[in-house]
Amino acid sequence: MKLTTHVLDTAHGCPAHGLAVTLTRLSDGRVLKSIRTNADGRADAPLLEGDDFQFGIYELSFAAGDYFRARGIILPEPAFLDVVPIRFGISERRHYHVPLLVSPYGFSTYRGS
């Protein structure tokens, strides 16, 4: 059992390289992992696995505003989307994949395989 993610920049039609992602378990507020996405827009390793993989509610926070500013996109202050939080539950012992498709003015997610 593991949790993975990847981020696609739909404004530019490419993986979101270097986007900061933080995983928090909400039951205890513990930050479990903070990473930056690789050239494929993915985490280099699972965000959650082994003993840390527990049933419960989690939140992935994606620093979209910082990512787009680093790409030279001029965003309003405050940005429409700065940090994109995705709150989800883990209730089964199976692989969870939570992708993010993001632009400066919209995002989408789903439970991937």
Image (spheres, helix red, strand yellow):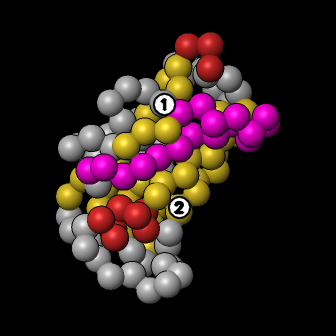
Q: What stretch is highlighted in magenta?
A: 17-33
- Asked if marks 1 and 2 touch (Cβ < 8 Å), the reply is no
The residue that label 1 is drawn on is 47
**Residue 1 belongs to magenta span:** no
Q: Which mark is first along the chain, 2 or 1?
A: 1
Report how far apart the C-alphas of labels 1 and 2 lie in the structure. 17 Å
Mark 1 residue type: Leu
Farthest residue toward the right?
Answer: 27
Dot 2: what SS?
strand
The numbered disc on residue 104 is none
Q: Which labelled disc corresponds to residue 84? A: 2
Query: Residue 108 or 79: which is nearer the viewer?
Result: 79
Across and down, in percent, residue 15 comes to: 24, 53
Query: Residue, x 25% and y 67% (percent of image)?
Result: 71
Q: Which residue reaches farthest top?
A: 51
Q: Left or right: 66 with respect to 78?
A: left
Check disc 2 and give the amino acid type: Val
Q: Where is residue 34 in the image (x, y as percent from the top left)?
A: 49, 38
Q: Residue at x 68, y 31 (%)?
A: 91
Residue drawn 33% across the image and 68% down it: 68
- Residue 12 appears in view: yes
- Counting from the top left corner in percent of width and height, residue 6 is at 36, 44
Could one spot residue 96 in this view of the protein?
no
For residue 112, above or below residue 61: above
Residue 23 inside the magenta-drawn segment? yes
Residue 50 falls in which quadrant of the image? top right
- Drawn side of residue 55 relative to residue 28, left or right: left
